[in-house]
Amino acid sequence: MPSKDKVLIANGQGFWGDSILGPVRLVEEGPLDYLTLDYLAEVTMSIMQKLRARKPDMGYATDFVQLIDRILPTLVERDIRVIANAGGVNPHACKDAILKVVKKHGLEGVKIAVVEGDDILDDLDDLCAKGEEFLNMDTGEPLSSVRDRVTSANVYLGAFPIAEALETGARIVITGRGTDPGLVLGPLIHEFGWGREDLDLLAAGTVAGHIVECGAQCTGGNYTDWQRVPDLARIGYPIIEASPDGSFVVTKHEGTGGLVDPSTVVHQLAYEMGDPANYITPDVCADFTSFKLESVGENRVRISGTRGAPATDTYKVSLSYHDGWKAVGQLTVSGPDALAKARACSEIVWERLRLDGFEYPQEQRLVEYIGANTCHAGIPVPGADDPAEVILRLGAKGPNKEQVGRFGMELVPLVTSGPPGVTGFAGGRPKATEIIGFWPALVSKDLIPTRVEVFSTED
């Protein structure tokens, strides 16, 4: 039988770089059992891999360490447990940094669990030898076409390893790559004793995790009808009030800004959605068309009746690879005739490069006129044809670092050798930086072992 009839799980980070005030206020402004923190995205993993390549003790979300330093005494005092995918591609380095924070605060008995198994970069060749093709899910291409350029490979693990970590009594659980909803589903499995066969319950926990995975995006942030959202400066981050039967309420702490109603929740439910009747995770395939959604009070939305189907026999894998070089820079061009001058500047840059023997095909060029309807191209916007000022954003990409770097030398000269009104050169001369390509694939679950290790300052 479940030990509790209600569990409060909040998510305080929607991405690496989200406001630190979100989780700080969540632990300080009201009751809570679990705090989840979602730092990872596909591009984040590749960035972390690059950081680790430069410095072996990096490759994780350093913001997480600063956050724990700030809230650890409160976590212990209020008995709040934390689950975070802040480990990135180096969860043990993240764990070591957190242990230093624990020592700094002089706290005893704080256990930290690390979930491992998602990083398969060193196992790729062995897995390929066992028959795994890692075909690109978008193009069908074999991994062999980019194998020598692969920089990271991480499996989206499910929620059961997180539940296993919580069974150890860990105060803080650190993971690498996993599914975003799994951060919430893990503690529900732990608290309510849900098993792998409890498909409807697992689906309900998956829906709950999906709703809060982007932080305040379900409590009024990034919301179309934003004018009716009160006090965005103090927006409350979301809380799941979960029950053992799989029903749950989406809410936030009393007295905080933001808004929770059926519309704000539905906005997030539709986020990054493929087939809503078959939302695939490592734990279950959830039917997002099955549940009932209703308002049950001010800033309280209840979801019940979620249905689930068996999980697939594969994990999704996020691979990244070196895909060439790019350089991007920008200038501010002021009026009159700002747009015409910005267009002339673009043409001048490409022509000067051609005169020096550097050709850039159209597919290797980026040309944007920000302030002249770049974001809504093709949709008439008043004043877009004659703006008072335009930001000219130019970029080049290609397989040759030297050629891409040469492009960056031609923006600054426009200040004195182009049309009048060219000012505001920002960011210095653009330099060639690496392009990281994304390669989604599948791998057989039975080839990917997971493990949990527990640490404390006494170890």
Image (cartoon, rainbow, N blue to C red):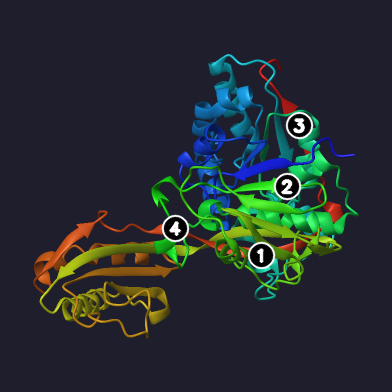
- Against 432, residue 109 (above or below) is above
Graded by Cα atoms within 10 Å as few (under 14), some (14 to 19) or many (20 or more), the crowding at tag 3 reads: few
Amino acid identity at mark 3: Glu
The image position of residue 22, as x and y in percent, is 50, 42
* Mark sitting earlier along the chain (3/4): 4
The image position of residue 81, as x and y in percent, is 67, 33
User: In this orientation, which residue lies closer to the viewer: 386 or 124?
Assistant: 386
Which element carries disc 4, helix, strand or loop?
loop
Image quadrant assignment for residue 32: top right
- Estimate the spatial distance between the alpha carbons at disc 4 and disc 2, rounded to whole Å: 25 Å
- Estimate the spatial distance between the alpha carbons at disc 3 and disc 2, rounded to whole Å: 28 Å
Residue on which disc 2 sits:
242
For the image shown, how many numbered marks are present on the structure? 4
- Estimate the spatial distance between the alpha carbons at disc 3 and disc 4, rounded to whole Å: 43 Å
* Mark sitting earlier along the chain (2/1): 2
Residue on which disc 3 sits:
453
Which element carries disc 1, helix, strand or loop?
strand
User: In this orientation, which residue lies closer to the viewer: 67 or 199?
Assistant: 199
Q: Does residue 118 show up? A: no
Amino acid identity at mark 1: Pro
Labelled pair 4, 1 in contact (Cβ < 8 Å): no
Amino acid identity at mark 2: Ala
Labelled pair 2, 1 in contact (Cβ < 8 Å): no
Location of the N terminus (image quadrant): top right
